[in-house]
Image: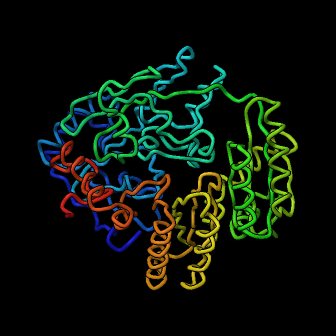
Amino acid sequence: MTPATKAAPAASIDSSVIARLRVIAGAENVLTEREDLVPYGFDGTAALKHGAACVVLPRTVEVVAEIVRFTRSAGIPVVTRGSGTGLSGGSVPVDGGIVLCLVHLNRILEIDPANLTLLAESGTITKAIDDASHPHGLFYPPDPGSMKISTIGGNVANNSGGLRGLKYGVTRDYVMGLEVVLPDGEIAWLGSKCVKDVAGYSMKDLFVGSEGTLGIITKVLLKLVPRPKARRTLLSSFDSMESAARSVSKIIERHIIPCTLEFLDSKTCQSVEDYAKVGLPTEAAAVVLMETDGHPAVVEEEAAAMAEIAKENGAISVEQAADEAHATRLATARRSAFSALARIRPTTILEDVTVPRSRLAEIVAFVEEVAARHRLQIATFGHFGDGNVHPTILTDETDHEEMERVEAALSEIFDKTVELGGTITGEHGVGLAKKPYLPRQFDEASYALMRKVKRALDPGGLLNPGKIFDLDHG
């Protein structure tokens, strides 16, 4: 978060607007009482809060469309929201607008094993999609850390990643179609069940990752894949981040693409072990969680090869999970990194940058140097296999002097990331928190092009205004 993203308390909404919203959505689905609005004034982003003026919880796409038509005619901004697990301030309400929360649109409408697809409403919990696929021998691979509570609409709007991104890709790779309410209230269906479909512009891809600024996603058609028949999980420890990074590079060079290659630095490892107590090697400078899945014979071969490569490149130890329960405990330990670190200081800022895999050791070392120079506690973990790093700053948002040092450190980290050929966000999105840094990554023409797309679809700038960029900039 930067000073430019700090917001004032929400403005009130005229009583006539509230009355109309109650007619459209039903009085029981419109929240206006202060205590009811509090949970909708923030997401998972630290130190970024803004009081909501009104919250509407529609139960059908037709209601969503009617609300959009009404708010457009009245010039009222709309911020779409799911479970509020975002880490960029993307669903934080803006002054004078309403929050449109889609959690009641939560049905899985169809599972089609013949075509390997699943159709779900946008408020469906991500893990529920994979759970529903399981009895059919199928699998929904994208697995953001918040998968137990995040909604699929939010995942699509932010193009969420996860631990399995190296092998299986991210949310965009599984979206075959979507239903979207456009800024004028029209309902459009984009995409199909066809594996090959190049009719016209690939419009669905425009909305994936658009963070609610171009339209409101209400249904998603997802690709499923056959569930892997076998899996092996290994935990390797190293005395330096460089040797850990080198091992990861060598694994990829051997044409082994594991489903998971995760790392924890020493600070994170110690915090996770204190929290989860799963026997992590806390004396190590870096710990790498490696997981391979697929055909049993291939899995055994790849697991043995990864263990050998790790040892050849300086691993202090390599442990293979004894059984499925042990493997689950190790994976759960990695997923608990944020929760474990959040216990240390009052405010936990989970950042998100990505660099080419070959520059991983450089960015991690730079984060350590920045932390020392700015006198900050920063723990680092992330997805080694795809270059996605999560520098996690442990601070106190009420300490203004320390927060100034946090801002300075983040600015340097983003600059270094771009210098290394990376991106300021690999999976969290831009939202409010990253908005000031976006121009550092794009040239003038590219940055202007995004604003042209926004103006073309939403000329009034009423859908999630102020997120990603400001229309009046440039």
Residue drawn at x 88%, y 43% is 322
Name above or below for residue 270 compared with residue 431.
Answer: below
Q: Quadrant of the C terminus?
A: bottom left
In this image, 144 relative to 184: left or right? right
In this image, 220 relative to 213: left or right? right
Counting from the top left corner in percent of width and height, residue 318 is at 85, 55
The part of the image, by quadrant, that contains residue 438 is bottom left
Task: Indicate how the structure is coloured in the image.
Answer: rainbow
Residue sticking out furthest to the top: 114
Name the foreground residue: 124 vs 203: 203
Residue drawn at x 74%, y 49% is 290
Name above or below for residue 155 compared with residue 4.
Answer: above
Counting from the top left corner in percent of width and height, residue 456 is at 18, 44
Residue drawn at x 63%, y 73% is 365
Name the foreground residue: 448 vs 98: 448
Q: Quadrant of the N terminus?
A: bottom left
Name the foreground residue: 448 vs 232: 448
In this image, 74 relative to 345: left or right? left
Name above or below for residue 117 compared with residue 250.
Answer: above
Count of labels in the image: 0
Counting from the top left corner in percent of width and height, residue 360 is at 62, 63
In this image, 177 relative to 463: left or right? right
The part of the image, by quadrant, that contains residue 23 is top left
Counting from the top left corner in percent of width and height, residue 246 is at 72, 61
Residue drawn at x 73%, y 54% is 250
